[in-house]
Image (cartoon, grey):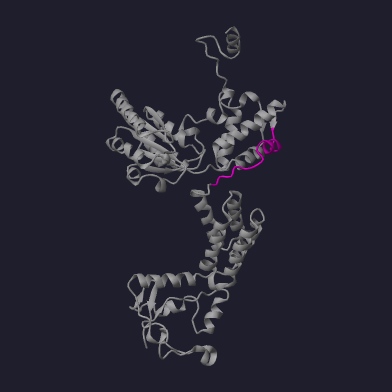
Amino acid sequence: MDELKEKRSLWDEAPGEAAPASKWEVPLAERMRPRSLEEMAGQGHLLSGDAPLARAIRSGRVPSCILYGPPGVGKTTIARLMASLTGRGFLEINAVSANVAALRELVAEAKRLKGLTGRTPMAFVDEIYHFNRQQQNALLPSVEKGDLVLVGTTTENPYFEINKTLLSRVVVYELRALGAGDLVRLLERALSDRERGLGELELSASGRTLGEIALGAGGDARQALTRLELSAHAVAAGGGSVIDVETVRNVSPKALQRYDRDQDDHYRIISALIKSMRGSDPDAAVYWLGRLVAGGEDVRFVARRLLVFAAEDVGLADPRALSVAAGAAYASDFVGLPEARIILSEAVIYLSLAPKSNSAYKAIDGALSAIERGELQEVPLHLRPGGKGYLYPHDFPGHWVAQKYMDRPFKFYRPGGLGEEPEMARLHGLKGDGHDADEDEDDPARQPGGELLAEE
């Protein structure tokens, strides 16, 4: 027993005496959490001047809302500021572990606080998308009656993840990743702040060094401050006074890769890749491909998108593009990463530089549109198996003969004007990009997605 008491005495303070907490035991990112809107980094579209959320906070009447954005951009901080600056109680619940009973307790506590203070308290739910439908519905009556101001945060798209009935009763504010300038200013303040920051260490860092930290943080203030703190303590431990780029790179050798294969980044970055190729910008296209590869995206997913792009956006302007994409799909799947990155890069550059035509895409969509409108034609008798009257084109000069292939002819295909397509169309007597559309523009028989040809 005496031995146990002796061991405990090494760790425990005397009863009733708590050890003074050192600020260095609290992460820098937490210590530097903004105490006012003026200290917020970025988010000027919501918080500066007459921006919507700033106006709401100044008026004291904040709405139930969802704060949507990537990690480390201030969602939780804004929620806390909304409560403190409007004089509201702040009730917090964990969306991962909370059950319906806990939500009912939260609602009851909100009603009690409102009765005591006359102010509607704020119920804060971090990562609210973890709530299932039943949990979200449990909050609906209280939100509608004004018993609480619901503020949820999410890194996932609320329009996909949040119950539509709840979403209709809140405002969605989208937060953006922080720019390098915003992060550098935050780092400068943290480096000089003696109360909450690193000022007591008497360290300095050049703009280039702080820019290196900001660049590696991927728009995440928490990540930027964590990298600064690690670098600062590494320098201080060695008796130095200057944080340099080499120290930053040694402490944090890789930039933060913000990529989620199943969520928003997945769709945003593949969209940027497709649009960069469509815009014939190989540098941008290779960059976005690099983001996909660095994020661990499935090679087959990328290859499938290249196949679609080759047919939809390059099309008949360069018929070889589809073969290039198909070859890249096979080869990258066969080889695998990391070498597959080279194969995909070759295909992306080829598709970016290729002439563009979407005539095949427009043609099939035009045909489908006509069919959906009820244009369901019978197959002409001479085109049916064993049908009489069919003219075999190979029996005629040029392997072509005039005959009907539809009872009511439509024009779905309009040749593009780039690459090989104009010549291919010319050989078949078809006019190039835009000419046919101009000639029958006023024809009342024209239909959206496919135009009925006037019969001779």
Residue 197 magenta: no
Position of residue 347 in the picture relative to residue 115 (left or right):
right
In this orientation, does residue 274 appear?
Answer: yes
Q: Nearer the viewer, residue 20 or 74?
A: 20
| Residue 14, horizontal then vertical, whole percent | 54, 9
* Side (left or right) of 41 relative to 105: right
**Is residue 49 visible in the rendered structure shown here?**
no
- Vertical arrangement, residue 164 with respect to residue 24, above or below: below
Is residue 62 left or right of 279 when viewed as pictured? left
Q: Image point 38% across, 39% down: which residue?
A: 65
The x, y position of residue 442, in whole percent, is 36, 78
On screen, residue 202 above or below 443: above
**Residue 199 percent coordinates (x, y):** 61, 26
Viewer-side residue, 116 vs 260: 260
- Give the image quarter of residue 46: top left
Q: Is residue 74 above or below residue 334?
A: above
- At 61% from the left and 42% from the top, the residue drawn is 216
Q: Residue at x 39, y 74 (%)?
A: 450
Residue 362 shown left or right of residue 88 in the figure: right
> Where the N terminus falls, by quadrant?
top right
* Residue nearest the observer in this picture, 419 or 109: 109
Residue located farthest toward the top when viewing the structure as drawn = 2
Q: Nearer the viewer, residue 212 or 398?
A: 398
Highlighted range, magenta: 243-259
Quarter residue 172 falls in: top left
Image coordinates of residue 39 in percent, x first then y, are 50, 33
Q: Quadrant of the C terminus?
A: bottom left
Q: Is residue 92 above or below residue 349?
A: above
